[in-house]
Image: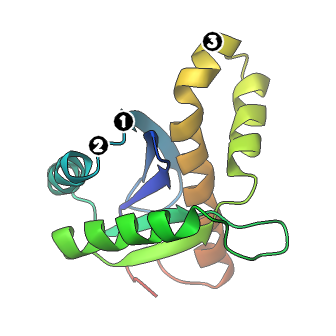
Amino acid sequence: MRWLALDHGTKKIGLAFSDELEILASPFEVWPQEEVRTLERLARLCREEGVQALCVGLPRHKDGAESATAPAARAFGEALAQRTGLPLRFVNEHLSSAEAERLLRERGVKPEKRKLLLDAAAAAVILDELLEDRRAKGIPASSLD
């Protein structure tokens, strides 16, 4: 199953893809958040890239409660799912940016480049979480659940 993951923000959106075997979650790009225009671009990207399912990071606090920005991420994900007809899963994104920052630093990415890549790397961290959970549950890559 080919997934598109989003790290939703008010100014930028990080994108990441999985391969069809759900082995790798790879950062793709960071786009400006332009609401309707971004939804249109994402729907087109889903068609072009053969995306079969969507994963959106849901901001949560340490205690698991949704943060103040969670409703916006949820609404954006639902709008994209409706526009594309693709199934949607939300994943707790707590600490995804911190983990992405750590991974980029470990890979030797310079600080100025890290800032540009961070949201896409965070989307890959979110997607990797979903893929790991699916593997742990024994869900085959050819199945949604």
Label 1 sits on a secondary structure element that is strand
Residue drawn 65% across the image and 60% down it: 93
- Residue projecting furthest to the right: 63
Residue 18, percent from left and from top: 44, 54
| Residue 1 visible at all | no
Residue drawn 28% across the image and 51% down it: 35
Report which residue position mark 3 lands on: 112
Residue drawn 63% across the image and 63% down it: 59
Residue toward you, 20 or 76: 76
| Residue 106 visible at all | yes
Q: Local crowd at mark 3 within 10 Å, few (<14), some, or many (≥20)?
A: few
Report which residue position mark 2 lands on: 34
CA–CA distance in space, label 3 to label 2: 24 Å
Residue toward you, 98 or 67: 67
Q: Disc 1, disc 2: CB below 8 Å?
A: yes
Q: Is residue 113 left or right of residue 65?
A: left
Give the quarter of the image for residue 4.
bottom left
Residue 113, percent from left and from top: 58, 15
Q: Local crowd at mark 2 within 10 Å, few (<14), some, or many (≥20)?
A: some
Q: Earlier in the sequence, mark 1 or mark 3?
A: 1
- Kind of residue indicated by mark 2: Glu
Q: Quadrant of the N terminus?
A: bottom left
Q: Is residue 95 above or below residue 135?
A: above
CA–CA distance in space, label 1 to label 2: 9 Å
**Circle number at residue 31:** 1
